[in-house]
Image (spheres, helix red, strand yellow):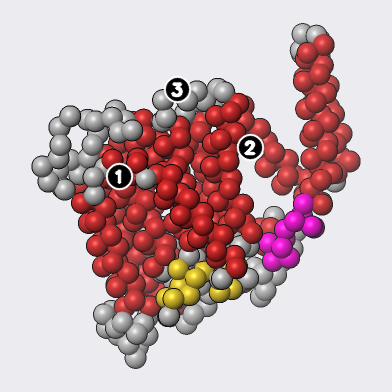
Amino acid sequence: MREQRSIFEGIDWVLVGIYLTLVLMGWLNIYAAVYNEEHKSIFDFTQNYGKQLIWIIAALVIAFFILAVDGNFFTIFAFPIYIIVLMLLVLVLGYSVATKGAHSWFEIGSYKFQPSEFAKFATSLALAKFLSTLNIRFEDMTTKMMAGIIIGVPAILILLQNDTGSTLVFASFVFVLYREGLSGNILLFGLLAAILFVTALLVNKYILIGILGFISLVLYVFSRKKTKDLLIIGGFFIISAGSVFSVDYVFEKVLQPHQKDRIEVLLGKKSDPKGVGYNVNQSLIAIGSGGFFGKGYLKGTQTKFDFVPEQSTDFIFCTVGEEWGFLGSVVVLGLFLALLVRIITTAERQRSQFTRIYGYCVACILFIHVGINVGMAIGVAPVIGIPLPFFSYGGSSLWAFTILLFIFVKLDAYRLQVLR
């Protein structure tokens, strides 16, 4: 087994380069989003952009230390790291500072620490360690249950913190499981369940039941008409019909009032441009006003006059759209796409199953973050409050994404070895 001669040997500099580019662009956009004429210096540490610079420097230090650690560290300590983060998720429920209704933050002086951000890379490590263990067969029900528990426990703890956005990110691990052998029927079932849920909110329940009954009848007519086929089709109809009638209960009893309002605004069932729909409406105005080339850096009027709330965090993308225009937005999304493609192609070249699985975890987490964040900025996804990786203001998210990515960069440096 060949040992590395230098901590930088075998490093994928393309991944590192894309990371540094995104972080730099994010910092410049945070500066634009909260620009203050009285604090023009981008190095003013009393302002958010100055604080972000400190967190960027700290993130680079963290990245350096990850590269300096032996790659086997992450396989050996995958489960201990996971357990430590679970303990933090439990502690934050009782000792947290409420922020916008979510009990997700520890407050340490003037700094707030969010364990749920770090749960993503900890869960990725634990899932990769479990699935790469010798004699694990994904077709076994026990394996599926254990994988579900590894993903589900932190997701439930985060949901108890009233942080729906971070909880939703854990759904991305289903795609990782699919790569490792999970039946595509489960993905299809999940997609159909989501479509059915949305449709049940828009269409009369009895009309929808009639449509499902017609579909079931057509399936039976074209089936082999055996008892097994009848049971499957009948089960499909009963489960679907039950799901339709349970939608109202879930919508009214499970979702929070603000979540219900946001979904209704997204689906066009409610118009509230000055209330629940204000953020999205202003974001769309900002992005639309940018046109093709944008208004120019620091020249965004929607940005300057604070029309868009949370513009340096959840809605940072509308700053890109207004000041850099359609062209700049395409460049940013192109960089994210390049990052995802590079991670997946790099994951596929690994000899180590652990590294491959972890790489897919990284790609899926980043994909759902980018998709939902940009989606809510342009009004095609509900506002659930998750950051845009490497762009949104905040130390916890930047450090967590840096750790998530650079663990993979380090593991990839051992691509010719099999890590256990």
Q: Measured along the vertical axis of the image, is residue 156 above or below residue 138?
A: below
Quadrant of the image containing the N terminus? top left
Q: Amino acid at mark 3?
A: Asn
Residue type beneath disc 1: Phe
Give the label, 2 or 1, closer to the camera. Answer: 1
Q: Residue at x 17, y 40 (%)?
A: 10
- Ranked by sequence position, the earlier of labels 3 and 1 is 1
Left or right: 33, with 408 as reference point: right
Q: Main secondary structure of the magenta part?
A: helix
Three-letter amino acid code at the position of disc 2: Leu
Pick whichever, 142 or 20, lies toward us: 142
Crowd band around label 2 with a 10 angstrom C-alpha radius: few (<14), some (14–19), many (20+): few
Q: Nearer the viewer, residue 47 or 60?
A: 60
State left or right for residue 284 relative to residue 215. left
Tell me the quadrant of the picture where the C terminus can be found.
top left
Note whether residue 206 is visible: yes
Q: Residue furthest bottom?
A: 38
Q: Position of residue 60 (x, y in %)?
A: 25, 61
Mark 1: few/some/many CA within 10 Å (<14, 14-19, 20+): few
Check disc 1 and report its element: helix, strand or loop: helix
Is 68 included in the stretch rendered in magenta? Answer: no
Q: Which residue is mark 2?
A: 191
The residues colored magenta run 250-260
The image quadrant of residue 196 is top right
**Residue at mark 1:** 73
- 3D distance between C-alphas at marks 3 and 1: 22 Å
Q: Which residue is mark 3?
A: 135
Q: Which mark is residue 3?
A: none
Q: Nearer the viewer, mark 2 or mark 3?
A: 3
